[in-house]
Image (cartoon, coloured by chain):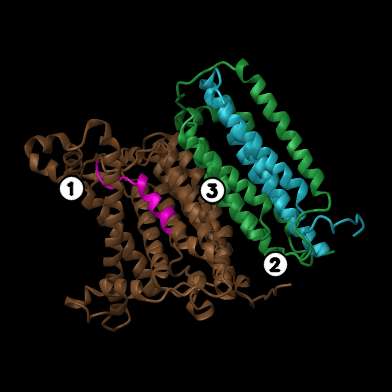
Chain colours: A brown, B cyan, C green
Amino acid sequence: MIAASAAANPFIVDADQVFVLLRDWLVGFLPAALRPAAGAVLGVIAIVCVFPGLFALTTVFERKGLGRMQNRLGPNRVGPFGFFQPIADGIKSLTKEDIVPLRANAVVHFLAPLVLVATVFMGFAVLPMGRNMVLVDMDAGLLFFFAMGAATELSIFMAGWSSRNKYSLLGAMRAVAQMISYEVVLLLSSVSVVMISGSLSLSKIVAAQDQYSGVFPHWYIFTPWGLAGFLVFAIAATAETNRSPFDLPEGESELVAGYHIEYSGFKFALFFLGEYLAMFSISGLGTTLFLGGWSAPFSFLAWVPSWIWFFGKVMLFIFVFIWMRGTLPRLRQDQLMNFAWKFVLPFTLLNLVVTALWRFMGPGWSRWIVCSLILLAAYVVMGRLEMRSDHFGRRSYRYAE
Amino acid sequence: MTTPLAGYLLVAALLFAIGLGGALARRNAIVVLIGIELMLNAANLNLVAFWRFGPLPEALTGMMFAIFSIAVAAAEAAVGLGLIIAVYRHAGTAELDKIDRMKG
Amino acid sequence: MSAIFYLLAVITLAGGLATVLLKQLVHCALAATVAFAGLALLFLQLDAQFAGFAQILVYIGAVAILIVFAILLTHGSHMPKDGVFSRSWALGLVIAAGVFAILGWAVLAGISAVPRQNAPPSATVRDIGEALVGRYVLPLEIVALLLTAATIGAVVVAMHEKASPR
C-alpha cells in the first residue's frame, strides 16, 4: 500500500518524511562522526519546541472551550479571538516575583519543578510521532516511559513537602497516592498490548497495528480486550495526570491549589507546563498502544502524512480531557481509591487473562464472542457489586492520631 | 584499577560499606531500612557487573539475579515499612534505641 | 574506565553518603533516590537496559515513595532532639570500614583471576523474556508468590489496630 502510493506520488512520501529529510539535510553539513549526535540534538530541540507550543495552543482552546460549555466567552482580549493569551500569560509569569516561603526547604523547593519537567520531557523520547520519527527507538521503550512516569511522582512529593504548607502537603500526598494506585492499572492495561504485539518497543507496537483488513485498520482498540484495556487506560491516564474528575490533588474548594500552592512566577509556570506535557505524553502513549499511533484510520487515507495522524489523535485525547473537565464533578478521596483498587484493578487483571485467551484461541470469530462475553459479564457483575447501596452509606471519618 | 570490572566492584563495595555503616550507626528505623536497601543495591551492581564482564553473558544469569533481587527488595521494603509503621503505632517512636521492650 | 563511569560513581556514592549522614529524614530519602538513580545509570552504562529501567521503576517509583510515606506517617520529618546517630555509632563505623577493607582487598587481589571479556553482550527484552519463562520460570513463580505474600503481609501488619476486632 505504502510502496504503491510512493511510486505513484513522490511528493506524498516527502510530506510524510519531511521532518526526517529536514533533519538529514541539516545533519549533512556536519562531518560524519558528529552526525548521530547532531541528529539526536535536533530531535531534542524539536520536541522541546513543539510540545510547549502545543501547550500554549491547548491552554487557549481549553479556556475557550470551557467558556463555551459554561455559557461564557472565555479569553478574547489579547490578539484575534484571544489567541495571543498564552504569550501574555507567559510574559506575566516570567516577570512576576518568585516568592519562596520563609520556612520552605529552599533547595528541594527549587528542584521540584525542574525534576518534574525534565522527567516528563524524557518520556517523549520513546514515542513514535510519525513514520521513522522516534528520537530513541529503545528495545524497552515502554518500560522507559513508565520509569520516567514513576519519577515524576517523587517531584510532586518534593514540591508538596518542601513548601511547608499543610495544603500543599495534603495535595502532594493525595497526588502521590492516587498516581501510585493508578500507575498499577496503567501498567497492567498496557501489558495486554505487549502480550499481543510481543514487544516493548513502541515503534514495533505501532508497526504491528499498521495493517488493514479491507479499509479497516488492525488497531488494538477494535478488539474486545483492546477496547476494555483502552477504557481502563483512559481512566488511569486521567487519574495519572490529575485531571478532572480525578483532580482531588488540586481540589480548589478544599486544598486551594494542592501541591503547587506555594509556587509563583516562573516555577508555577513550570508546574503548569509539566502538567500539560504529562497529558500530551500519556495521550501519545494511549494513541501508540491502542489507536495505532501514526497509522491512518482507513487504508485509503494512508496518503496523509503520518505525523498529522499522531498529533490529531493526541489532540482528540486532549479534547476529551477538556470535555470531561467541563462535564464531570470531582470524586471523593475514598471513592477514588475504592474505584482504583476494587473495580479497575481486578477488571484489568481479568483483561490480562482474556488477552491470553484471545491469543491462544487463534483467528476465527469464536474468540470475539467468548472474550466479549467474559468482559461484559465481569463488568456487569463487578459493577453491580460495587454499586450496592450500602457503599453509599454515611461517610465514615477517620482523624489523624 | 586495571579493569572496568574492578572499578564497578569497588564502587559496589564502597556503597555496601556506606549502607552497612548507615544501618549500624543510625537511630531511626527508616534510615536503617534505607541502608539495607543500599546494601542490596550494591549487591545488584556486583551481579550486573559480573554479567557484563563475566565469561558467559548469553546465559543472562547475573542479569536475572539482579532483576529478581530488585523484585525481592521491593517486597522487603513494603513489609519492612509496614512493620515500622506498626511499631510506631505501638511504641510511639521509630527510634531504634527507644524500642527496647519485648513486653507490649 | 570512562569519565562517565567516574561521574556516575561519584553521584551514586555521594547520594549514599548523604543518605547516611543527613539529619532530616526526608532529605535522607531524597539522597537515597539520587543513589538509586545513579545505580540505574550505572546499569545502563553496563548495557543492562532492562535492569536499569526496572531499577528506576521499582526503586524511584515505588520504594522511594513508600519510604517518604513511612517517614510522614511516623512523624519522622521533625528534627530529632538528641542526635541522629545511635550510641554505638563508632562501632558501626569500624565494622563498615572493616567490611570495605576486606571487600576491597578481595576485589583487588582476585580481579586478575576473572577472565576478561569486553565485547558488550546483547540482551534484548525478548531474550530476557524467554529466559524468564524458560530457564528461570521457577524463580519467577516464587517471586510472584513472594510479592503476593508481601502485599498481603504489609497490609495486615500496617492495618489499623483499632479496626480489627479483638
Circles 1 and 2 on the same subunit: no
Q: Residue at x 71, y 54 (%)?
A: B30
Please state the horizontal and vertical placement of residue A95, each as a whole percent of the image.
34, 74
Q: What residue is disc 2 on?
A: C78
Q: Is residue A394 positioned above or below A41 on the image?
A: below
What amino acid is labelled 2 in the image?
Answer: His
- Count of marks overlaid on the render: 3
What amino acid is labelled 3 in the image?
Answer: Leu
Q: Residue at x 39, y 55 (%)?
A: A282
Please state the horizontal and vertical placement of residue A5, each as a whole percent of the image.
12, 38
Q: Tell me which segment is drawn in magenta.
A: A117-131
Furthest-right residue in this view: B103
Point out the image quarter for the C terminus of chain B.
bottom right
In the image, C88 versus C35, the foreground residue is: C88
- Magenta stretch prevailing secondary structure: helix
What amino acid is labelled 1 in the image?
Answer: Pro
Q: Earlier in the sequence, mark 1 or mark 3?
A: 1
Q: Residue at x 8, y 43 (%)?
A: A11
Disc 1/disc 3 C-alpha distance (Å): 37 Å
As helix, strand or loop, the secondary structure at mark 3 comes to helix
Disc 3/disc 2 C-alpha distance (Å): 40 Å
Disc 1/disc 2 C-alpha distance (Å): 57 Å
Number of residues whose C-alpha sits closer than 10 Å to that of mark 3, classed few (under 14), some (14–19) or many (20 or more): some
Left or right placement of residue A310 versus residue A185 in this view: left
* Marks 1 and 2 close (CB-CB < 8 Å): no
Q: What residue is disc 3 on?
A: A349
Q: Which mark is residue B35?
A: none
Left or right placement of residue C67 versus residue C7 in this view: right
Q: What residue is disc 1 on?
A: A305
Left or right placement of residue A42 versus residue A220 in this view: left
Number of residues whose C-alpha sits closer than 10 Å to that of mark 2, classed few (under 14), some (14–19) or many (20 or more): few
As helix, strand or loop, the secondary structure at mark 1 comes to loop
